[in-house]
């Protein structure tokens, strides 16, 4: 009887044990089943894979991937870090998520904040990303389709790497630099297709790198250089860089880099370079708009460029103290469209020192001094269109110790109590600072002033220019020295009429003489063809009649083209739909023309150009806007 009792007791003990195991398992399932997780920490000493099955991974102490070891993270894995913990990689990290299943590096705090955890740090022994001859990733460390957020605890960056491919990741809300990825000449870093958003430091810091196709948005680097990007010896292309802030270079701060085909908009800095601050680089084919410098003496609203080139960019609606569009020294500025920028002091479109400014379109900018350009020292300014800009001095250009050659300077304005030089204000000119072969027509100063198209303080040589139609005068001499102004065209061949267009010694003996004889009988063929003056418009019923003054020339074969558009007062004017044809309409040598077929609900913009018998065409005349039954002559006012 004793033996069966013994087995019964043993059986009961086993049953109790199994029940305890089941209860324990159920309890564990509630913690690690319904909300299953894997706690990790310490060194990883052999090749390891973090699987989506065991996700999320909770980093309770910092993780170190030892040299020679590979950590692979599967798509869809979530890694949550306790406060201050980091993932340090001395070997290889392969984190390749997918668009549908990204890998997440985030905070384990219930209410996450920037700076909760440390960062992903690659030490000098970590493997770099390797690529084939086409630039495609082959092997080595990689971050692709990852989310990195709320990092930056006691560290300067969320990702700290070298020669790493960071591709198609979201890096946001970190308490420091978003991506710090520095390459070398033979192994550049590659930062491609990422969203770098709202980090409390520069969005991307890099050297010797390729930075392409990223969205870089709302990063704040209040005390430093570069809000969106800081780059040296790098290429930045096809990025959208918007609404970032820094002390210098709100959107981009670069040295010796190429910046091309980016959109740089809405950025701001306190000191210099609202959109871009660049030293020794090349800035080309970018759209740079609505950037600003907030400090009282900050320069370069769109671009501040030192010592290289700014080529073929569209630069608009930027603002600064000096150089609303561009502040540039010792470089080349060529082929840019620069419009509607503003400087509170000098150079609404461009502030330039020791530069070549060639073939730019500088339109509707404004400043206190130098509405289009403020040429500070030893610039060569050639072949530019400078039109419809506004300032108190130098509506088109204020020029110090600079040379102006074959520019069209037309329809600029000066305002204020003491206006100077509606087209050009030459200040402190020196020997060799010549004004040659320009067309300076249709610039406007207040009727009671004694200035007009060009006002000179200095000793410039002024030859082969077209001067006429400036109000109230064509040329004003302020200094006491005589100015050589021979071989210019004045729109008239009567000497007394020319003298009436000049303010000099003959009006005030304290001024020098403008020596204008001999003068040209026809516009100089090497100078830009003048646009028609006196462009006006009237309406009757559903038709409008355009009129303008004939060019003052005795040559045959000259004619005019009417342009119209419905979307903008700036070129191109490619309107369609009027009964007389699509824009432009060649009207031959007529100076009055009627258009019909208007849509009463649409605004229209009109302008006219001239052409000569040698195939040259002028810049556009002033622009008139039809708004219902009202006519508006553009531009209207300073900003």
Image (cartoon, grey):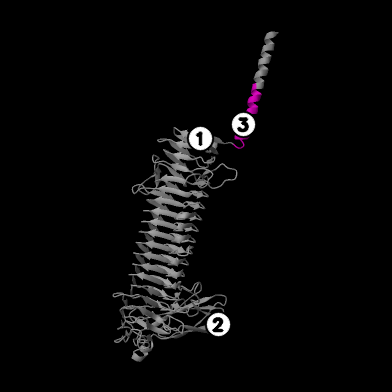
**Secondary structure of residue under mark 2:** loop
Contact (CB < 8 A) between labels 2 and 1? Answer: no
| Cα gap from disc 2 to disc 1, whole angstroms | 80 Å
Q: In this figure, which residue is indicated by the disc labeled 3?
A: 28
Q: Nearer the viewer, residue 55 or 487?
A: 487
Tell us which disc is closer to us: 2 or 1: 1
SS of the residue under disc 3: helix
Magenta stretch: helix, strand or loop mostly = helix
Report the disc number at residue 542: 2
Q: Earlier in the sequence, mark 3 or mark 1?
A: 3
Q: Is residue 90 visible?
A: yes
Residue drawn where x is 37% and y is 81% of the image: 478
**Tags 3 and 2 in contact by the CB under 8 Å rule?**
no
Q: Does residue 344 lie above or below 487 as drawn?
A: above
Residue at the farthest top position: 1
Q: If you read the primary sequence from the N terminus, does the residue marked by circle 2 or circle 1 appear first?
A: 1
Q: Secondary structure at mark 1?
A: strand
Which numbered mark, 3 or 2, is in the foreground of this view?
3
Separation of residues labelled 3 and 1 (CA atoms):
21 Å
Q: CA distance from mark 3 to mark 2?
A: 84 Å
Q: Nearer the viewer, residue 166 or 377?
A: 377
Residue 483 is situated, as x and y percent measured from the top left of the image, at 31, 82
Please report the bounds of the magenta region as a residue range: 17-35
State the residue at coordinates (39%, 39%): 125
């Amino acid at each position: 009887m004793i033996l069966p009792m013994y087995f019964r007791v043993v059986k009961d003990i086993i049953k109790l044990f199994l029940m305890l195991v089941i209860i324990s398992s159920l309890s564990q399932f509630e913690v690690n089943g319904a909300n299953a997780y894997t706690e990790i920490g310490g060194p990883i000493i052999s090749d390891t894979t973090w699987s989506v099955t065991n996700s999320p991974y909770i980093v309770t102490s910092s993780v170190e991937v030892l040299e020679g070891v590979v950590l692979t993270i599967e798509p869809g894995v979530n890694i949550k870090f306790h406060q201050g913990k980091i993932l340090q990689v001395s070997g290889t990290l392969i984190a390749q998520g997918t668009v549908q299943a990204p890998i997440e590096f985030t905070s384990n705090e219930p209410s996450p904040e920037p700076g909760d955890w440390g960062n992903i740090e690659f030490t000098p022994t970590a493997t770099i990303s390797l690529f084939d001859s086409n630039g495609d990733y082959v092997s080595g460390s990689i971050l692709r389709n990852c989310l990195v957020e709320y990092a930056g605890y006691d560290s300067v960056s969320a990702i700290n790497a070298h020669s790493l491919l960071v591709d198609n990741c979201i890096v946001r809300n970190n308490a420091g630099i978003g991506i710090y990825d520095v390459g070398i000449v033979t192994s550049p870093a590659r930062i491609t297709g990422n969203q770098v958003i709202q980090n409390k430091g520069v969005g991307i810091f890099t050297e010797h790198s390729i930075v392409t196709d990223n969205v870089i948005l709302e990063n704040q680097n209040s005390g430093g250089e570069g809000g969106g990007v800081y780059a040296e010896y790098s290429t930045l292309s096809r990025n959208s860089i918007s609404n970032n802030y820094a002390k210098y270079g709100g959107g981009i701060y670069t040295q010796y880099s190429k910046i091309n085909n980016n959109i740089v908009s809405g950025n701001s800095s306190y000191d210099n370079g609202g959109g871009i601050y660049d030293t020794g680089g090349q800035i080309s084919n970018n759209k740079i708009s609505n950037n600003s410098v907030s400090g009282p003496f900050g320069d370069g609203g769109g671009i501040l460029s030192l010592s290289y080139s700014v080529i073929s960019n569209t630069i608009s609606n930027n603002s600064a103290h000096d150089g609303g569009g561009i502040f540039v020294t010792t470089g080349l500025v060529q082929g840019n469209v620069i419009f509607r920028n503003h400087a509170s002091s000098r150079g609404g479109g461009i502030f330039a020192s020791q530069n070549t400014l060639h073939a730019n379109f500088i339109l509707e900018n404004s400043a206190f001094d130098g509405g289009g350009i403020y040429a500070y020292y030893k610039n060569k300014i050639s072949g530019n269109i400078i039109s419809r800009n506004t300032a108190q001095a130098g509506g088109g250009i204020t020029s110090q110790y600079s040379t102006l050659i074959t520019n069209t300077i037309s329809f600029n304005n000066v305002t204020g109590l003491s206006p100077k030089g509606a087209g050009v204000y030459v200040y402190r000119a020196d020997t060799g600072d010549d004004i040659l072969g320009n067309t300076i027509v249709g610039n406007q100063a207040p009727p009671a002033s004694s200035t007009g198209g060009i006002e000179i303080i200095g000793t410039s040589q002024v030859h082969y220019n077209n001067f006429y139609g400036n109000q109230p005068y064509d040329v004003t001499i302020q200094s006491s020295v005589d100015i050589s102004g021979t071989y210019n065209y004045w729109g008239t061949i009567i000497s007394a009429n020319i003298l009436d267009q000049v303010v000099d010694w003959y009006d005030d003996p304290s001024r020098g003489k403008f020596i204008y004889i001999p003068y040209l009988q026809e516009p100089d063929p090497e100078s830009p063809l003048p646009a028609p003056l006196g462009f006006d418009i009237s309406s009757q019923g559903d038709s409008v009649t355009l009129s303008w003054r004939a060019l003052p020339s005795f040559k045959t074969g000259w004619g005019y083209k009417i342009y119209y558009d419905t979307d903008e007062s700036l070129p191109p004017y490619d309107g369609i739909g009027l009964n007389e044809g699509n824009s432009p309409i060649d009207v031959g040598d007529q100076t009055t023309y009627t258009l019909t077929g208007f849509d009463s609900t649409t605004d229209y913009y009109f302008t006219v150009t001239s052409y000569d018998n040698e195939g040259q065409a002028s810049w556009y005349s002033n622009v008139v806007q039809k708004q219902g039954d009202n006519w508006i002559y553009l531009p209207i006012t300073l900003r």
